Amino acid sequence: MILEKEEYPARNVKQAMRVREADSMIQSIFSIEVELVVQAIFLRYGYNFRDYSRASVKRRIAARLKKEGLDNMAALQHKILHQPDFFEEIIDDFSINVTEMFRDPEFYLLMREKVFPVLQQRKSLKVWHAGCGSGEEVYSLAIFFYENGMCDNTQFYGTDINNRSLEKAKAGEISIKNLRNYNANYQAAGGNSSLVDYFTLTATMARLNDNIRKNLFFTEHNLVHDQVFGEMDLILCRNVLIYFNEKLQRRVLRLLQKSLRPGGYICLGMKESLYFSPDRDNFEVVDGRVNIFRLKGKVEKDSGHG
Ligand SMILES: C[S@@+](CC[C@H](N)C(=O)[O-])C[C@H]1O[C@@H](n2cnc3c(N)ncnc32)[C@H](O)[C@@H]1O
């Protein structure tokens, strides 16, 4: 059929509309399939990713489909359900285990300036790193505690859902390739020696020295459904909430608050806030730029644990 010239635009518009409709149908089917995979993971393994940011979960699943060369979600779901080892990869995908030592050096500068002087007055301290990844954040804070004479009377707890990350954290090792960058962060954070002083080097790895490592404890804890974690003086939960929806952020912020002693501190990532906390009035802002908050309330006179 030959079209008259004036019919061209109408036909193009119709075609464009059909393409758009098809696209949106594909997107909505993809959304349904993602929900089914998330539900399947929960039923099979008990990991609940239902309240993780949908956009991030979708991106991760799409990337995984591509990486595995799978052209449909049923095949991915089958692999997840039948191969627990493969599921570990999916945990890696969803948990986004990007980290580094002295991440956001300014945060550490402000911690040393505004929080350390208060904590130094306490006899013993408990610090919880919720969502600690492979331990770099814990090593960083412990090194600064050491430099300020606070390491020996502190217990550091690092928790995460990702067991592979926790195994790395327990080993206390970082790749030697990262030392230079981490040292730059350490200096920017106000470190007054050289990072290498705190590590024992092998050909490829650098191992955190025992005098610091002895006070670090790592264990599994899932912020989605596990309970309060001790009476903490300081909690770092940095770059974790950002992957959660509003409802889950509310739950986690309440859990963190309940895990704090009065006068205790909570530190969030640079892109996170207490905004969704139903209890945000219970906190005073210590530093609003790097997100350090302090739980109001009467601090016990001695403020020690033992
Ligand atoms: C981007 S990393 C942040 C690591 C470190 N806090 C930092 O800022 O460098 C996010 C971490 O949160 C952990 N995570 C995700 N969901 C979690 C949950 N439900 N409970 C505990 N940790 C979780 C991930 O496994 C990952 O190690």
Image (spheres, rainbow, N blue to C red):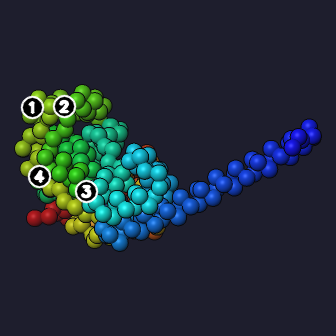
Q: For ligand 1, tell me if the residue under mark 2 lies within 8 Å.
A: no
Mark with earlier residue (2, 3): 3
Give whichever of discs 4 and 2 has the lower sequence position: 2
Tell me whether the residue at label 4 lies in contact with that at label 2, contact meaning CB atoms closer than 8 angstroms: no
Q: CA distance from mark 1 to mark 4?
A: 22 Å
Give percent across and percent down for residue 47. Answer: 33, 66
Using the rendered view, name the quadrant where residue 265 is placed.
Answer: bottom left
Is label 1 in contact with label 2 (beta carbons under 8 Å)? yes
Spatial separation of the CA atoms under disc 4 and disc 3 = 31 Å
Query: Distance of mark 2 from mark 3, alpha carbons?
Result: 28 Å
Q: Secondary structure at mark 2?
A: helix
Q: Amino acid at mark 3?
A: Asp
| N-terminal-most mark, 1 or 4 | 1
Badge 4 vs badge 3, beta-carbon distance below 8 Å: no
239 or 4, nearer to the observer: 4
Image location of residue 28, percent across then percent down: 59, 60
Which label's residue is closer to the chain start, 1 or 2?
2
Choose between 62 and 159: the one closer to the eye.
Answer: 62
Instruction: State the residue position of label 2.
Output: 176
Q: Residues within 10 Å of mark 3 (few under 14, many from 20)?
A: few
Q: Which label lies toward us, 4 or 2? A: 2
Say if 77 sits above or below 65 in the image.
below
Marks 1 and 3, the one that precedes in the sequence = 3
What's the residue type where badge 1 is placed?
Thr
Q: What element does badge 4 sit on? A: loop
